[in-house]
Image: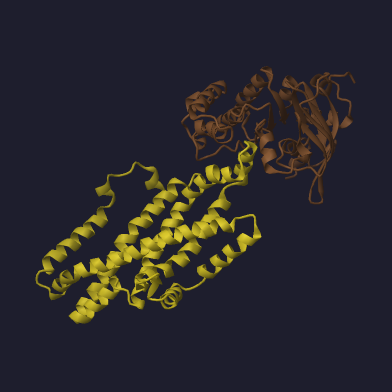
Chain colours: A brown, B yellow
Amino acid sequence: MPSIETVAEPLVSLRDLHLSFGANPVLKGIDLDVHRGQAVSIIGPSGSGKSTILRCITGLLQPQRGSIRVGATDVHTLAKEAQRIELRKRVGFVFQQYNLFPHLSVLENLVIAPRKVLGRSRTDAEKEARALLAKVRMEHKADAYPGQLSGGQQQRVAIARALAMRPELILFDEVTSALDPETVGEVLTVIRELTEEGMTCVLVTHEMRFAEEISDIVYFTENGVIVEHGSAAQIFQHPGSERTQEFLRHALGDPGRRPAHSNDPYLLTNLSRYSLSV
Amino acid sequence: MAIESSVSAPLAWPRRHVGKLLLLAGAVLFLLYFAPQSPVFKALLQWSPALAVGFGQNILISLVAIGLGSLLGLLVGALAVSPLRLLRLPAQIWVQIFRNAPWLVLIYFTTYVFPFEIKLGSTYVSFPDWVKVTIGLALPASANVAEIFRGAIGSIPSTQWEAARSLAFTRGQIFRSIILPQCFKRMLPPWMNLYAVITMGTALASLVGVHDVIDTAQIASNTVNMTGFTVVIYLSLLVLFFAYCYPISRLTQRLERRYAFY
């Protein structure tokens, strides 16, 4: 495996992460590194613990074992909510279901956290919010409420809301899974631009083509372990593990059909023989 | 049909309420025609200022009761969602006791438990009956407001908490800036409904000797001593309470429709 790691310290590093919900183990020893400026994708079947990894990075979930480091912060040792709040000021999070605040206008959604959490002035925060809305091409909806927007529009606002905190790192949790195929594109365009600008991004995604195109590193997880990781080209063109190959074959559109049974009476193509007797 | 009428363009107000307006016009004409001759309507006219004063007492009791009950209820409701069991438990007991007690019993209870005056230093502060009744109504109101509040907080999806936490809000900030503003909009319709119910509950005040509209009507009917008058005066009480509570319940319905989408 060619070394793709740079000499610098990774911005995020997870070591031997274990987490279980009750008796149900979700993460069984995850090792993951994200370097500054990289776009890292985590792919894998549903229920393999991808979203859980993101929630651990931002301290929304506490692992039972293992270490999480974000910059100089040892996330797994944080005991107080105040310390986690300091961490979350530096880490943005975008959710699958957007989770905008429905009682606030689009502009207020972007302004509230910088004002209340970072203590910025209203004029300052609004100016930056409008710039961010322009960046995600939503400036014309600044005064609309989330309920009046389409899913794709809401998700772009949610990305702008995360950016308004000027994070070092943004975590995207299946951000296009709730969108229809046509609006997926507008959200992915925004994320692509962010990665091109050098924003450090960790994406959990089911959009394989997109992951292949924009990721520097791709991790494939299954059943709470990392099966394989490497550069996007390596994972998508020459996957080492058989399981990765099978997953990608399904995910990239080849249905991997089972061979048809020649005289299966229930197969529609074989039905004609019987239709005479009806 | 209800669905169709709500979709089609709204009619102008007089055309939409043509039946009600005709009924009202008929009632007014009837009164104008009969009232001058009838001794019953003459007596009613004579007593109507007293009835209005009595009804003012009812409205005063209901407003103070819902005000007190809301303040107390928000406090109890906030305690009921506290993560500390020690705070949650008394709030739950409060809600269970006062939500499940008959209002009349609570009114009798407060009337006979509190003294008629309180000694503050050297001055005596009187503790009139209507205040006791108000407290008696404020207690169940507070328990109901607490439940409405708790329900509203619970109805905010947990993803809102998660989203706010990921934006580095503290627990207190999330509660104040994100959860509460969404709660109040959801609480408004059931809270107004509760107010209408409390207003109707003020009719119980006459039973412990408060000079409210019911008490006035009783006195009037005993004084005038005409069967026709007794019927008419209680009918006019119905109309009074209906005229006060119906707009509230209509407004509630409108607000419910308006906030139904979120």
What's the residue at 9%, 72% (across, down)?
A: B37
What's the residue at 44%, 53% (across, down)?
A: B189
Task: Please state the horizontal and vertical placement of residue B133, each as a whole percent of the image.
Answer: 39, 71
Compared to residue A51, the image places residue B4 above or below, namely below
Compared to residue A99, the image places residue A36 above or below, namely above
Task: Please state the horizontal and vertical placement of residue A104, each as a whole percent of the image.
Answer: 50, 37
Return the residue nearer the eye: A90 or A275.
A90
Quadrant of the rendered image containing residue A228: top right
Q: Is residue A260 visible?
A: no
What's the residue at 65%, 27% (across, down)?
A: A167
Q: Is residue B225 left or right of residue A268?
A: left
Q: Is residue A97 visible?
A: yes
Compared to residue B217, the image places residue B18 above or below, namely above
Going by the picture, which residue comes out furthest to the front?
A: B122
Q: Is residue B7 left or right of residue A268?
A: left
Return the residue nearer the eye: A22 or A254.
A22
Q: Is residue B91 left or right of residue A212?
A: left
